C-alpha cells in the first residue's frame, strides 16, 4: 500500500521481506476475504482452524529461531504480517499477539526445557497464545494484580480473574501474571503458564462485545484452584515477572504503532476511493475544496506518524528502542489514527444539516459500515466525540453499540452505550447520536 508515497526504509526493501509481504497478502486474500471477516465479526471470533492454517503456512513464530521451533525470521517479518492484516482489514485476527508478544516471553526468558516444550507447538498452531494481565481492578497498574499462584508441593495453585484478554475464547496457552508472593508487591510477581486443555478449575467467561475489533475473541477468564506444574514458571524461578514485563514493553508498544499506521493507511485509501466516486450537488466529493483541505491535513499527519514509526523500527532492529520512545510512537499513532479515521471519513462535508444524504456522506461511521474499513477502531472516534459534547459528563468506558432504526429517517443507526462518571450506563445525547449515526447504502 503506497497511499502516502513514503519510501520504505532500506531494511524493509530487502527482496526477502518484500516477497514475504506479498505472499502474506495473498494468504490473507484466500483465508480472510471480506466475507470471512464479516463472519468473524458475527461470531465475535475467528474460527479455530484459522490458527492451524496459519501454522501450516509458516505464519506463526515468524521471528523465532528455527533451532527453537520458529520460522527463523526477525521482527521485519512480524511487521510485514501486521501491515498486511491492517491494509486488508483482517486485523481482528490476534496472530500478532501470539507471535510478537506471547512467544517472545518464552524465547527470551524460558528455560531450554520450556522452549523445547512450547515453542514448536505454538508455531504449529496446536497451542494458541494469550497473556492474562488485566483484571477487573487492575489495568495498566500491573503491581496491583490480585491473581495469585501459591506454591503447593511441586506445583502452584492459581486463583483469580482476568478480563479483556485477547484470544481468550480460543487460547489454550495462557501466560498469567500472578503474585507468587503477595507480600512482596512487584518483586513477588511471576509469569506462569496455564495450559487450559483439561485444566480443572479454569473457566472462560463472556466473550466480550466491543465497539472495535469485533471479530477478535476478547474474554473474561477465571482461575479457581487451578493446579499448575512447578516447571511452568517462566524462567524457572519466582519473582522475575515484573522485570520480564517491563523489558518487553518497547516491542509491545511498537506493535500497536505499526498496526495503527496500517489501519489508518487503509482508512485514507478507502476514503480517497469513496470521495472520488461519490457525487453530491452535481460534482464529485473530492472536487470540493474543503474535502481537499481535510484530506491533505490527515495525509500530512499520517505521513509524519509513519516516518516516526519507521525510525522506531530501525532502532528496535538495532536493539536501541527504549520504552519511552516506543510509548511516544504508540501514543502519537493511536491518536492520529483516530483523527485520520474521523476526519478522512467525514471530510467535514455536512453543509446542510437538513440534507440527510449529505449528513450520511459526512459521517465516518457511514463509510465504516459501508466498506468495512474502520470497524475495528470505532472507540477512538466515538470517545473523542463523546468527550466534547456529552454535556460535560466524563466518559469512563464504552459498553457497546446497539443497532436501532430511526423513526423520521428510516435507516440503520448505531447507538453508543457508555459508562459515565456520574450516572448509570445509558445512551449519549441526541446530538451525539446524530454525529455517530450510520446509513449503509
Image (spheres, rainbow, N blue to C red):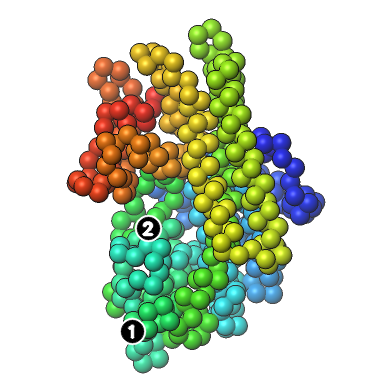
At a point 35% along the width and 40% down the height, the residue shown is 387
Residue 183 disc label:
1
Q: Earlier in the sequence, mark 2 or mark 1?
A: 2
Query: x%, y% of residue 22?
Result: 71, 46
| Image quarter (top left, top right, bottom left or bottom right) of the N terminus | top right
356 or 31, nearer to the observer: 356
Q: Residues within 10 Å of mark 1 (few under 14, many from 20)?
A: few
Report if residue 335 is visible in the image: yes
Is residue 100 something that shows in the picture? no
Picture coordinates of residue 273 (x, y %)? 59, 25
Name the disc covering residue 365, or none. none
Write down the residue under mark 2: 164
Q: Pick the quarter of the image with the C terminus.
A: top left
**Tag 1 secondary structure:** helix
Q: Nearer the viewer, residue 223 or 104?
A: 104
- Check the image and report above or below for 216 versus 114: above
- Residue at the extreme top of the image, as rendered: 282
Q: Quadrant of residue 400?
A: top left
**Residue 193 appears in which quarter of the rendering?**
bottom left
* Residue at the front extreme, as displayed: 392
- The 10 Å Cα crowd at callout 2, few under 14, some 14 to 19, many 20 or more, is many
Q: Residue at position x 55%, y 20% from top? A: 290
Amino acid at each position: 500500500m503506497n497511499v502516502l508515497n513514503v519510501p520504505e526504509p532500506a531494511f524493509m526493501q530487502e527482496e526477502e521481506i518484500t516477497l514475504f509481504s506479498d505472499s502474506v497478502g495473498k494468504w490473507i486474500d484466500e483465508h480472510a476475504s471480506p466475507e470471512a471477516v464479516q463472519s468473524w465479526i458475527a461470531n465475535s471470533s475467528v474460527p479455530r482452524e484459522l490458527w492451524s492454517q496459519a501454522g501450516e503456512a509458516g505464519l506463526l513464530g515468524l521471528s523465532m529461531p528455527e533451532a527453537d521451533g520458529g520460522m527463523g525470521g526477525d521482527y521485519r517479518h512480524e511487521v510485514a504480517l501486521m501491515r498486511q492484516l491492517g491494509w486488508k482489514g483482517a486485523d481482528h485476527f490476534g496472530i500478532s499477539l501470539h507471535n510478537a508478544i506471547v512467544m517472545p516471553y518464552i524465547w527470551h526468558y524460558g528455560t531450554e526445557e520450556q522452549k523445547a516444550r512450547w515453542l514448536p507447538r505454538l508455531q504449529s498452531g496446536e497451542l494458541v497464545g494469550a497473556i492474562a494481565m488485566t483484571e477487573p481492578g487492575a489495568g495498566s497498574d500491573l503491581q496491583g494484580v490480585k491473581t495469585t499462584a501459591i506454591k503447593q508441593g511441586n506445583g502452584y495453585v492459581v486463583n483469580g480473574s482476568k478480563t479483556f484478554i485477547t484470544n481468550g475464547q480460543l487460547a489454550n496457552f495462557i501466560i498469567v501474571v500472578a503474585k507468587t508472593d503477595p507480600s512482596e508487591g512487584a518483586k513477588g510477581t511471576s509469569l506462569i503458564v496455564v495450559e487450559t486443555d483439561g485444566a480443572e478449575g479454569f473457566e472462560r467467561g463472556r466473550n466480550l462485545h466491543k465497539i472495535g475489533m469485533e471479530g477478535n475473541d476478547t474474554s473474561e477468564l477465571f482461575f479457581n484452584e487451578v493446579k499448575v506444574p512447578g516447571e511452568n514458571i517462566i524462567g524457572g524461578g519466582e519473582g522475575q515477572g515484573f522485570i520480564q514485563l517491563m523489558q518487553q514493553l518497547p516491542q509491545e508498544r511498537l506493535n500497536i504503532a505499526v498496526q495503527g499506521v496500517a489501519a489508518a493507511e487503509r482508512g485514507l485509501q478507502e476514503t480517497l476511493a469513496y470521495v472520488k466516486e461519490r457525487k453530491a450537488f452535481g460534482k464529485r466529493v473530492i472536487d470540493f475544496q474543503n474535502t481537499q483541505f481535510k484530506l491533505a491535513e490527515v495525509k500530512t499527519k499520517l505521513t509524519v506518524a509513519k516516518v516516526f514509526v519507521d525510525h522506531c523500527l530501525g532502532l528496535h532492529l538495532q536493539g536501541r528502542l527504549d520504552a519511552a520512545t516506543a510509548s511516544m510512537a504508540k501514543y502519537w499513532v493511536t491518536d492520529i489514527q483516530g483523527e485520520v479515521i474521523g476526519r478522512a471519513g467525514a471530510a467535514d462535508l455536512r453543509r446542510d444539516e437538513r440534507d440527510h444524504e449529505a449528513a450520511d456522506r459526512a459521517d465516518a461511521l457511514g463509510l465504516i459500515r459501508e466498506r468495512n474499513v474502520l470497524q475495528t477502531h470505532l472507540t477512538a472516534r466515538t470517545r473523542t466525540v463523546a468527550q466534547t459534547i456529552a454535556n460535560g459528563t466524563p466518559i469512563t468506558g464504552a459498553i457497546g453499540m446497539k443497532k436501532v432504526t430511526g423513526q423520521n429517517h428510516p435507516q440503520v443507526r448505531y447507538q453508543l452505550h457508555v459508562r459515565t462518571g456520574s450516572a448509570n450506563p445509558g445512551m449519549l445525547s441526541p446530538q451525539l447520536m446524530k454525529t455517530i449515526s450510520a446509513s449503509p447504502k
